[in-house]
């Protein structure tokens, strides 16, 4: 479909390219990052019998987990929380791994913020070129959505191996391997992560479909470019 224009003014190609990249990052990160909230985590921990695994109550699990989520996303703490004001629940090796996870999560939050700024700026610049904006949205949504489908299939077929591969990529020092007596694995058991991974994948796919729908509508109703 050709884009009708008036005049010859046209935004340079890096602008829609950066806008599309920023939107792809937003689609990829928004859903998974929103899962780092105490309500969702508490629900999943209850479903996976975490209080029974730790021989405590859901209230104590929620208290410890909420503090650790703050350490992950905002507080940059030491993950030294304990059950009922007892000693730290996690060993020093487990706390070291959680600090590494916190560094990654906070980096992704910064990337998300940067992508949001670029996406808003790009949308403002491209507001009179809705056809190009729509094409960028279609590309971003389709690319990330397709990637999410492939990864979801990989995780669903062999979750344990996919989970190990994921950790090997982001934590190459290998400090994520713990024995069956690990309280970290009791607090966040494998089935917990399986359900979280599937939820994150669904969130990415749905976000991609929304972005593609908006992009399709914009692409079909091109704007007039002023000269």
Image: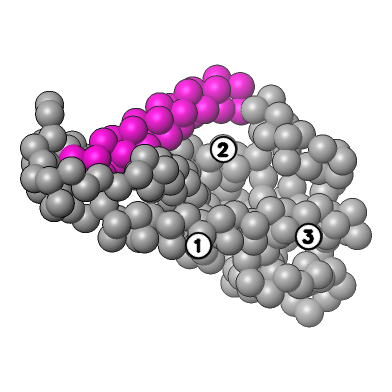
Residue 225 lies, in percent from the top left, at: 15, 48
For disc 2, the marked residue is 194
Residue found at x 21% / y 55%: 127
Residue found at x 36% / y 40%: 13
Label 1 vs label 3: CA separation? 21 Å
Q: Nearer the viewer, mark 3 or mark 2?
A: 3
- Which secondary structure lies at badge 2? helix
- Which secondary structure lies at badge 1? helix
Q: Earlier in the sequence, mark 2 or mark 1?
A: 1
The 10 Å Cα crowd at callout 1, few under 14, some 14 to 19, many 20 or more, is: some
What residue span does the magenta drawing correspond to?
Answer: 131-160
Q: Residue 113 carries which label?
A: 1
Q: Horizontal placement of 20 versus 75: left or right?
A: left
Q: Earlier in the sequence, mark 1 or mark 3?
A: 3
Instruction: Depth check: give the residue in front, 87 or 9.
Output: 9
Residue 149 lies, in percent from the top left, at: 43, 27
């Amino acid at each position: 479909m050709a884009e009708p224009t008036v005049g010859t003014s046209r935004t340079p190609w890096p602008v829609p390219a950066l806008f599309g990249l920023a939107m792809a990052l937003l689609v990829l990160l928004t859903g998974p990052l929103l899962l780092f909230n105490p309500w969702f985590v508490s629900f999943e921990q209850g479903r996976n019998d975490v209080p029974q695994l730790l021989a405590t109550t859901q209230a104590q699990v929620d208290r410890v987990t909420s503090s650790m989520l703050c350490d992950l996303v905002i507080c940059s703490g030491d993950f030294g929380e304990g059950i009922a004001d007892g000693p730290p629940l996690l060993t020093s090796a487990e706390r070291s791994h959680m600090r590494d996870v916190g560094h990654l999560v906070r980096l992704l939050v910064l990337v998300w913020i940067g992508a949001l700024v670029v996406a808003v700026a790009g949308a403002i610049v491209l507001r009179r070129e809705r056809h190009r904006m729509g094409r960028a949205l279609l590309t971003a949504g389709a690319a990330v959505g397709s990637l999410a489908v492939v990864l979801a299939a990989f995780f669903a077929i062999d979750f344990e191996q996919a989970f190990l591969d994921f950790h090997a990529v982001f934590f190459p020092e290998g400090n994520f391997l713990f024995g069956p007596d690990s309280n970290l694995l009791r607090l966040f058991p494998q089935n917990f992560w399986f359900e979280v991974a599937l939820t994150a994948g669904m969130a990415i796919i749905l976000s991609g479909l929304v972005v593609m729908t908006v992009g399709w509508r914009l692409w079909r109703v091109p704007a007039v470019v002023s000269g």
